[in-house]
């Protein structure tokens, strides 16, 4: 009776949160010893489904079979007992504990720690040898890179003898090399008979790594296909429910005169460390300059210095006029007045106030604009709301309700609100950081189109992104940053990923260390 | 200052540091588990009143001690329900409980004994009495160490020794046991504990219960050992001083012992203005000496003792996310 071909079988799983049907009659069967991808846009119900599998929620109806056995999973402990291990997008690690302590937590052998720790040390050594999962067991988590922290999460699951490993958006925080390493580990695990469920919105990862892929849209499972028999275009269409352009369509650049000129720009952080070590470049009208690089190599400081958030030294001119880099006139407000719009990298920290409504967020930075004032004392909130409604319509923000709090929108729609606010001001220079981080595929297409159309209107754009694909498809020119410096400029038509990857790792194009 | 005077001051230091130490370790368990507890003061006060009252009425200090612990645990339970079950604001809950304790102790004592909110003085079996450690008398003639042992180490009530032994016990529980690992984890990242299949609420309630027990000991010690009875507001801010000591000690048990001894030393100095005058050659007004422990508290809380990083999830109710 028990069909043990499948590691996991879900039959008719439904889950509603109040009026929102997060999962509707989900059927899925994951064969043992395979890597199974689950893709879908943000809010498609992937996370809810996995939370049901890990015992965070109970399904309203439906049946879960693990290895052919009907199983109820009322809490995480039951999920662990059923052999399910979960690697969350945001790691569940205790930052000031060692690797060993994190692995042992919740899976201790007895009331005293010593025995558990020495057993875990031995198991970790074995696992490290078997699966390329080496991590120093005595390292403290906060000293580890995100790639290593993720390995600790995988080790935690394996230490609990998980046969089924679920990974939620595992590559969001990894460098390309780290992501490759992760996929090697996953394939190794699969070859040892483990079953892996990979949740992602990145089509390339699905195509390269999985055996089968299931697509979710708006709470339903729209289909499961063999990866070898599908294409990124077909998957994207299944996800969004319509045809999607994966490549950005853009005309050749019509370059005008120089808009932004940056010479020897330097930024020192609050600890006295020089983060930007003398950066020089120019951006001309009608040009997108893309800054590639692994996160933390000075890109954020560059955006902050130009956006008026961080103090800097050097020389910056906008359309021939000097911009003060410290003191009077170097604040964000003066920059906006000078014609620089800024879509910050971290929209939830710098771009929006999450508890404030959409229309209030649309006012930020431009709250003293004349069209928002009723008289000398009061703002014209009606005009603001009407303006927000107009922007929401133009930028297809859903739902188009100006009085909704920013936190109630999905990541993609939050980003559209920020982009609408900045682009609609018709700036001479747009600074835009990580424009599509945490944004679903339909919204990515839209935001990319907006950036290109701004460039076609003859504006200058500085694009910072850790997504190499995004940089390559949007930019007219690419600068690669490493350790606070620009390693070189490349033409996106003539460069390739290997060349850029080397520069991102601090080598010059000729393969020498800088 | 002669040796005998020094020993006297050290002797009072230990006696005065004991309630601080109990309260400080009480706070340590709670805060390490991620529950801020500004209500140490109120719990001590409740325990002091309850223990003195029951000890007087039954004539047994042990019954008093039990009553003090229970009263303190009751207060801790309310704080737990407010901040763990209902995810309330931990500071507000703690402050409210302090107010409740401040009023209710006087009310109950007045109702029971009609002596202006005090309990009658405790005598005989209704109090803890000093115990003499083995060989204290015999070794008294040994130079330097003999008197030190006799005057400072020996001759305290049982609870003083319990307090000192709680320090290594706490260290051992925190760093050598499964419970300690989970307790520290839940104060740093409750989500890690939750996804490991352990109950966050269960752990936090356990920590809060221990806080209740230790505050009970602190209050009972004040009313039945340090002094002979309860008087209104007798804890006089010791709960807050203990919190300052906890921050000073950076939430570590052994450092907590030293921090509490330092605060106790300042309190002991305030009792001997004559000695202070003899040492510094200037007459320092007594109110200024009285204020010293509190001044030190303010300095510690204002961050003049270097950066103290509290448990990362402290003060934040845990809400399960997807």
Image (spheres, coloured by chain):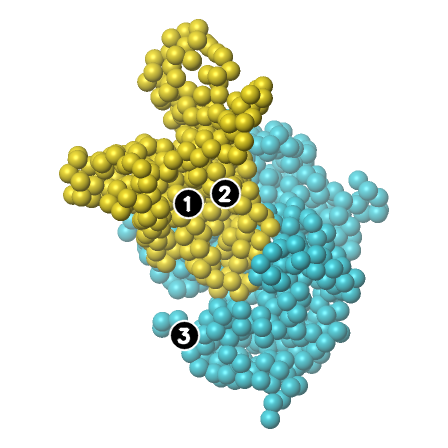
For label 1, count other residues whose C-alpha is less than 10 Å away and answer few (under 14), some (14-19) or many (20+). many
In three-dimensional space, the C-alpha distance between marks 2 and 1, rounded to whole angstroms, equals: 9 Å
Tell me the mark number nearer the camera, choosing from 2 and 3: 2
Helix, strand or loop at mark 2? helix
> Which of the 4 image quarters holds residue B126?
top left
Q: Is residue B22 visible?
A: yes
Helix, strand or loop at mark 1? helix
Upstream in sequence: badge 2 or badge 1: 2
Identify the residue under disc 1.
Answer: B214
Residue that lies at the very extreme toward the top in this rendered image: B281
**Rendered colour, chain B:** yellow
Q: Are marks 3 and 1 in contact (CB under 8 Å)?
A: no
Q: Nearer the viewer, residue B100 or A5?
A: B100
Q: Chain of mark 1?
A: B
The image shows a total of numbered marks equal to 3
Q: Are marks 2 and 1 in contact (CB under 8 Å)?
A: yes
> Which of the 4 image quarters holds residue A123?
bottom right
Looking at the colours in the rendered structure, which chain would you say is drawn in cyan?
A
Q: Chain of mark 2?
A: B
Badge 2 and badge 3 both on one subunit: no
Q: Chain of mark 3?
A: A
Residue that lies at the very extreme toward the bottom in this rendered image: A1
In the image, residue A474 lies at what x, y percent? 63, 56
In three-dimensional space, the C-alpha distance between marks 3 and 1, rounded to whole angstroms, equals: 45 Å
Identify the residue under disc 2.
Answer: B166
Identify the residue under disc 3.
Answer: A16
**Residue at 64% across / 70% down in the picture?**
A162
In three-dimensional space, the C-alpha distance between marks 2 and 3, rounded to whole angstroms, equals: 50 Å
For label 3, count other residues whose C-alpha is less than 10 Å away and answer few (under 14), some (14-19) or many (20+). some
């Amino acid at each position: 009776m028990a069909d043990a071909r499948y590691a996991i079988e879900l039959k008719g799983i439904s889950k509603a949160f109040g009026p929102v049907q997060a999962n509707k009659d989900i059927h899925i069967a994951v064969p043992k010893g395979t890597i199974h991808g689950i893709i879908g846009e943000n809010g498609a119900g992937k996370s809810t489904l996995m939370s049901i599998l890990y015992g965070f929620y109970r399904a309203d109806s439906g049946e879960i079979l693990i290895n052919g056995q009907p199983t109820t999973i009322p809490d995480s402990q039951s999920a662990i007992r059923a052999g399910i291990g979960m690697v969350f997008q945001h790691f569940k690690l205790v930052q000031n504990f060692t690797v060993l302590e994190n692995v042992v937590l919740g899976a201790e052998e007895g009331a005293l720690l010593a025995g558990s720790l020495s057993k875990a040390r031995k198991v970790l050594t074995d696992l490290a040898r078997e699966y390329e999962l080496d991590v120093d067991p005595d390292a403290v988590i906060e000293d580890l890179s995100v790639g290593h922290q993720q390995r600790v999460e995988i080790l935690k699951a394996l230490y609990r003898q998980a046969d089924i490993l679920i990974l939620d958006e595992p590559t969001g925080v990894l460098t390309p090399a780290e992501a490759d390493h992760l996929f090697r580990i996953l394939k190794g695990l699969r070859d040892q008979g483990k079953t892996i469920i990979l949740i992602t919105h990145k089509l390339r990862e699905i195509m390269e790594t999985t055996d089968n892929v299931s697509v979710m849209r708006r709470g339903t499972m729209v289909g499961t296909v063999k990866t070898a028999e599908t294409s990124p275009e077909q998957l994207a269409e299944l996800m969004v429910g319509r045809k999607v352009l994966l490549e950005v369509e853009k005309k050749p650049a019509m370059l005008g005169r120089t808009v932004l000129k940056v010479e020897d720009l330097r930024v020192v952080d609050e600890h006295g460390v020089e983060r930007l070590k003398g950066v020089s470049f120019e951006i001309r009208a009608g040009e997108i300059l893309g800054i590639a690089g692994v996160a933390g190599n000075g890109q954020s400081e560059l955006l902050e210095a130009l956006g008026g958030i961080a103090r800097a030294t050097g020389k910056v001119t906008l359309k021939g006029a000097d911009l003060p880099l410290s003191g009077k006139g170097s604040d964000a407000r003066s920059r906006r007045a000078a014609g620089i719009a800024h879509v910050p990298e971290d929209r939830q920290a710098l771009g929006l106030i999450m508890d404030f409504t959409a229309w209030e967020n649309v006012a930020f930075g431009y709250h003293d604009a004349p069209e928002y004032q009723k008289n000398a004392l009061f703002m014209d909130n009606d005009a603001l709301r009407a303006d927000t409604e107009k922007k929401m319509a133009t930028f297809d923000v859903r739902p188009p309700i100006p009085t909704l709090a920013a936190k109630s929108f999905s990541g993609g729609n939050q980003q559209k609100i920020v982009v609408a606010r900045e682009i609609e001001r018709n700036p001479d220079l747009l600074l835009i950081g990580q424009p599509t981080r945490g944004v679903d595929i339909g919204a990515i297409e839209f935001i990319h189109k907006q950036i290109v159309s701004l460039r076609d209107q003859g504006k200058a754009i500085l694009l910072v992104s850790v997504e190499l694909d995004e940089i390559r498809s949007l930019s007219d020119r690419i600068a690669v940053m490493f350790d606070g410096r620009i390693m070189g400029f490349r033409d996106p038509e003539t460069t390739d990923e290997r060349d850029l990857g080397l520069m991102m790792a601090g080598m010059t194009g000729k393969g020498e260390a800088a | 200052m002669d040796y005998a005077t020094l020993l006297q001051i050290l002797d009072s230091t230990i006696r005065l540091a004991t309630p601080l130490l109990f309260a400080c370790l009480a706070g340590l368990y709670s805060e390490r588990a991620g529950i801020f507890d500004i209500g140490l003061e109120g719990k001590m006060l409740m325990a002091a009143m309850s223990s003195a009252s029951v000890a007087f009425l039954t004539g047994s200090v042990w019954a008093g001690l039990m009553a003090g612990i229970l009263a303190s645990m009751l207060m801790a339970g309310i704080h737990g329900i407010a901040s763990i079950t209902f995810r309330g604001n931990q500071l507000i809950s703690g402050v409210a409980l302090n107010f409740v304790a401040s009023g209710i102790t006087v009310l109950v004592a007045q109702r029971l004994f009609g002596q202006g909110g005090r309990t009658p003085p405790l005598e005989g079996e209704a109090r803890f009495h000093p115990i003499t450690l083995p060989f204290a008398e015999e070794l008294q003639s040994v130079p330097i160490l003999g008197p030190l042992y006799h005057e400072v180490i020996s001759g305290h009530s049982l609870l003083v020794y319990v307090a000192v032994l709680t320090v290594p016990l706490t260290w051992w529980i925190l760093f050598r046991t499964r419970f300690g690992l989970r307790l520290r984890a839940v104060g740093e990242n409750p989500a890690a504990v939750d996804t490991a299949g352990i109950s966050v609420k269960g752990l936090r309630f356990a920590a809060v219960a221990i806080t209740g027990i230790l505050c009970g000991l602190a209050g009972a010690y004040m009313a039945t050992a340090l002094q002979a009875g309860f008087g209104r507001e007798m804890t006089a801010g010791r709960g807050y001083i203990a919190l300052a000591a906890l921050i000073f000690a950076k939430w570590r048990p052994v450092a907590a012992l030293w921090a509490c001894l330092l605060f106790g030393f300042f309190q002991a100095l305030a009792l001997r203005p004559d000695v202070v005058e003899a040492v510094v050659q200037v007459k320092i007004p007594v109110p200024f000496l009285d204020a010293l422990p509190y001044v030190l508290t303010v300095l510690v809380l204002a961050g003049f003792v270097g950066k103290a990083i509290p448990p990362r999830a402290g003060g934040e109710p845990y809400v399960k996310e997807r």
